[in-house]
Amino acid sequence: MYHISVMPSEVSKYLINNPNGLYVDCTFGGGGHTIYLLNKFKNIKIVAFDWDEASSNKFFENENEFKNRVAFIRDNFKNIKKNLFGININKVDGILADIGVASKQLDDMGRGFSFNSNVLDMRMDKRNDLTAKEIINSYSREDLADIFYRYGEEYKSRHIANAIILRRKRGIINTASELKAIICSVKKTEGKTNPATKVFQALRIFINKELENLKILLSDAPGLLNSGGRIIIISFHSLEDRIVKQNFKQNANCGIYRTLTKKVITASQEEININHRSRSAKIRAAEKTNV
Ligand SMILES: C[S@@+](CC[C@H](N)C(=O)[O-])C[C@H]1O[C@@H](n2cnc3c(N)ncnc32)[C@H](O)[C@@H]1O
């Protein structure tokens, strides 16, 4: 399925404070937010990051009207400072991060993000070594339970870890669908949510060090923003949202940020009807003060 960008008009409202400014899109993905912003504000420029090689290819391989206004860096956004300094950029007017999984990544059965994948991988950046297959087939019962609980808030973490260890005695677990079957043998469906959702989320967050990357980005952001510059984060689960909320609050307490979203921004019912993925998206935004 084609990736539909989440809340583009809210993103532009909270991100753009200088119509001639330089912005960073930390999560280029299919380029949806970047292209929306470049279209709407004809004088802005964007440096875009994404660590997934599948992300930038089509946009940057083809000639297009935006080529002179956007540069792409294939790296983890936790290295934002080093990369920007490397191209002689010390300050920017806004930083956007939309930290979910792109529809393209979910739909690619060779990536292992979806329940029916025929692999167990889940790396967003294939240059990293650790895969879900290695974790599921070699980590101890305690370590598995800890990952499922800590990063998925899975209350059946121990039962699921036990079932995995038992199943391992019969041979290697090779695919996401095998893992899903093990989880479903322990956990019944609750409402519309697949019983494997939390374990898959936990593995993805752990493998890609998603919370650590976010914390580094948030800690570097104040030093990179001009006065009046904005930071906006779109998160998709409570662990991330908590980190963003706390960071903005701490920076506001120190007078570094002014919080722009007193209450978290969520998608309208109209948007959710068109783009189901937007139902769990939360936007928080802050502005760098003059200190
Ligand atoms: C939800 S998609 C972004 C979609 C994009 N905003 C759009 O409108 O098309 C998230 C993207 O962020 C990338 N990503 C996630 N964490 C990253 C990180 N730490 N560094 C760089 N890219 C990251 C993923 O590879 C994925 O392509």
Image (tube, rainbow, N blue to C red):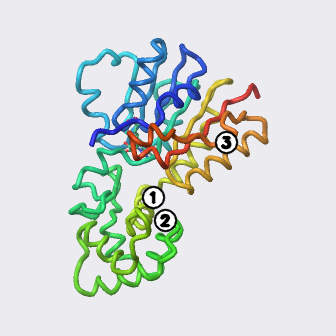
Distance between the alpha carbons at the discs numbered 2 and 1: 8 Å
What residue sits 50% from the left and 24% below the top? 88
The quarter holding residue 228 reads top right
Q: In this view, does 113 lie to the left or right of 97?
A: left
Q: Is residue 285 left or right of residue 207?
A: right
N-terminal-most mark, 1 or 3? 1
Mark 1 and mark 3 in contact? Answer it, CB < 8 Å: no
Q: Tag 2, which secondary structure?
A: helix
Q: Is residue 289 above or below residue 167?
A: above
Please state which of the two labelled residues, at mark 1 or mark 3, is closer to the viewer: 3
Q: Tag 1, which secondary structure?
A: helix
User: Which quarter holds ligand 1?
Assistant: top left
Question: Label 2: few (<14), some or many (≥20) within 10 Å?
Answer: many
Please state which of the two labelled residues, at mark 3 or mark 2, is closer to the viewer: 3
What is the x, y in percent for residue 109?
23, 55
Which residue is the site of mark 1? 205
Which residue is the site of mark 2? 152
Please state which of the two labelled residues, at mark 2 or mark 1, is closer to the viewer: 2
Which residue is the site of mark 3? 263
What residue sits 31% from the left and 75% below the top? 137
Q: Can residue 85 be seen in this view?
A: no
Front one among 290 and 268:
268
Question: Label 3: few (<14), some or many (≥20) within 10 Å?
Answer: few
Front one among 215 and 266:
266
Distance between the alpha carbons at the discs numbered 1 and 3: 25 Å
